[in-house]
Amino acid sequence: MKRFAGIARAVGLALALATTGAWAESAGDTPRPPAAPPPIPVSSTADHAEFEALKRAFASGPEVTEACLSCHNEADDQLAHSLHFKWDYESTSGQTLGKSNVINAFCGNVASNEPRCTSCHAGYGWDDMSTAPAEMEVQPDCLVCHDRSGQYTKTATGAGHPPLDPVKPGTKTITGAPAWAVDLSKAAQSVGMPGRDNCGNCHFYGGGGDNVKHGDLSSVLYAPSEEVDVHMSPEGENFTCSTCHVEEDHNWAGSRYDVDMSIPEEAQEPGAHRVTATCESCHSEQPHPLEVASGPVFIRNLKLNDHTDKLACQSCHIPEFARGGVPTKTLWDWSTAGQMNAEGKPYSEDNWTSSTGKAMHTYMSTKGNFEYGEDVVPHYAWFNGSITYTLGDETIDPTRTVEINRLGGEAGDGVSRIWPFKRMEGRQGYDVNLNRLTYSNVWGPGTDTAFWTNFDWGNSIEAGMAAAGAEYSGEFDFVDTYMYWPITHMVAPAEDAVECAECHAEDGRMADLAGIYLPGSDPNGLTGIIGKAILTLVLLGVIGHGLLRVLGRKSKEG
Amino acid sequence: MSKRIVKVYPIFERLWHWMQMALIVILLLTGFSLNGQLGLVPFGPAVVFHTLAAGLLLMLWIFATFWLFTTGTWKQFIPRIEGMIETARFYALGVFRGEKHPYRKLYLRKHNPLQAATYFGLKWVIFPVIWVSGLFYLTYTLWEGGESAGVWIVVVANIHVLAGYVVACFVVVHVYLLTVGQGFRHHVRPMLTGYEEVDLTTEQEAYLEANEPDRLKPRGVPAQ
């Protein structure tokens, strides 16, 4: 077992190096695939390398899918009903969400930018948001989730297809690495249950780069130290994503649109059948154990358990996000995009350096201004699990900061708890006459509308609005925005949890939060002033009394 | 009437006093630390030791209440008006002129009238207030579903803190008064040894000689 852990760690390290691109600089001109990912603790009764249907050459991704379906004949139907495939979600709030519908504070929208954005779609060739992928007969991509050879990937702009031999020079993968030729046969024969790498190759790179979007999902999680993620670390539990995000019929527990706050079932062991992905699913509502020997620990845990009525576990146990050396984007100002340098060419500036020494773009002609953060203290807010979006047909108030998504719930509603969030600051386009957020066409080499090629906001927005089928007055400006990302990954070891005094103090972490009484946060309030005044008067009285006694004694002696 | 050195503070009462003193000091230090006034103890340990000390003090008081009523000592703590004016006058004026304390310690009256009144107020007002508010504070999660619980917790917490300040004031005055009269050591010693010189009536003296000779020191022995 020890030996296995050692191998796993070594492989994990190799993978971590590979995915950070450290190898690429020394590998010459031919990009090479990363090493196989570390083994994950699952058992299987089938070795897919032995299956005749897979012992052949494949000319395309969809061909592999056909081979998979020759045995797994319900899998495509299951996947076709999942969010990973549909990008369309009927929220409990009544809104229609999903990537095909929402506007975000990053690249904005998928419509008109399809082959770039759908490079991470769990299918092959979805290149039109206005038609559902099932209608377009888009073939599901089994390998992106089930490849265990580590060398399967998708090209960054190929609507979900993998880079195949011969790879066009300059092609990049969805993680931004120079693309290599995927060996589909090897990938098909390697399949197994998804590892952190399968999920991470897309989810760690949301927003166009490593940890740009979520803040708590970065390439660090391919093989995190225990300090970064106590559950997923190969040094510890070695959880995969699906250890928590349990699956049923290719639908996964855990949603950013409708967040499960707590589990209605009893606490269960990891891996047991359940349908939610909350901390409490395993740790229960009384997560700090009371079966302890010492009185002080008992009292401490009792008091800590008292917090679960008001606090999400994440609020204390994820002290900061973007830990482990990969920064997250905290501000994206589109309004400054389009400036050219002295030669009239697009340019970029790198005025921010990560803790690992990586220079980060702070300005790009294509995208505008950026700010970053590492080890970021979250924004805290009351949250009942429901998130609603400011969709393209909603009226906004451009005189105020527009919330791209809104957190449901408030103090005292009996459901909401204080959750940690990444609060993304943005500045993005809106229609000044209709007061609505705008869609924009940013990607599209060869078009005369894509902003990243033509640097013309007017054309870009017009094309984006047309692709989304949205009404547009023709006049735009930019508006400040906030977008909230629930923080729930990168759970730190217990000893690194947020210290009590981080919140129980004047100007603590929760200082801006209404609706909660925090002992210790108001030592100089009215009671503190009255108390200190009384105590001061008593002290002065005692000192005065003492002095008079001394003087009285002296005068008597004199 | 004769002056005799008598054990006025039996062992339980002395233990009660000093354990109470230690626990109250711990409660004040941890309490004002977690309230944000003192940086002595970090918030987490402050809560733990504040709660533990409160639990121990509560237990001690259950024992003490039992003891007070079974031994009749409770009568010592009943205030009375008689002698109050003289005592107050002494602290306000006489003490500066080097007058003698008007109160003579009696066997059945260990406390002077002001002392008795102070302890009475402490025991019947301040301590109950701090206990009740403290227990409500500690058990907030049991009643947080109640109406306006969010307002009441603020009220409870502020009452508790304010009562804590009053206890701190008591400690200041209590310690200061030990220096009045015959001095600090003279006042503290009986609470350590149990013995103090008091006026005994002939009957009391005869009773103690006959029934509780251990409580009486032979004549002429200093109260060490």
Image: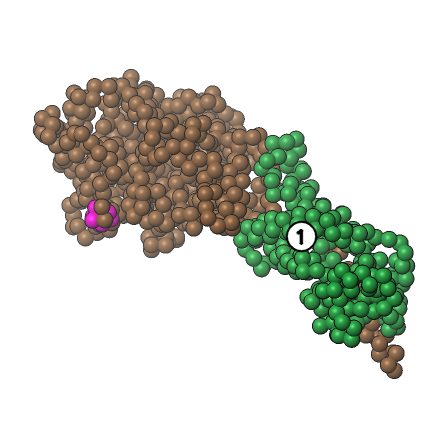
Chain colours: A brown, B green
Secondary structure of residue under mark 1: loop
Q: Amino acid at mark 1?
A: Asn
Please, is residue B63 above or below residue A157 in the view?
Answer: below
To which residue does mark 1 refer? Answer: A524
Side of B79 where A514 appears, left or right: left
- Residue A192 percent across, percent down from the top left: 21, 32
Q: For the magenta stretch, what is the residue range? A: A3-10
> Quadrant where the C terminus of chain A lies?
bottom right
Q: Residue furthest bottom?
A: A558
**Is A405 on the left-hand or right-hand side of A521?**
left
Residue A386 included in the magenta stretch of the image:
no
Q: Is residue B57 above or below residue A63?
A: below
Does the segment drawn in magenta span residue A6?
Answer: yes
Name the residue located 66 percent from the left edge and 31 percent from the top edge. Answer: B147
Could you tell me which chain the residue with mark 1 belongs to? A
Between B57 and B50, the one nearer to me in the picture: B57
Asked if residue A357 shows in the view, the reply is: yes
On the image, which quarter does residue A52 sit in? top left
- Residue at 29% x, 35% y is A199
The crowding category of the residue bearing disc 1, from other C-alpha atoms within 10 Å (few below 14, some 14 to 19, many at least 20), is some
Q: Nearer the viewer, residue A51 or A345?
A: A51
**Which percent across, then down, holds residue A37?**
22, 42
Q: For the point 39% across and 53% down, which residue is it? A: A351
State whether the magenta stretch is mostly helix, strand or loop. Answer: helix
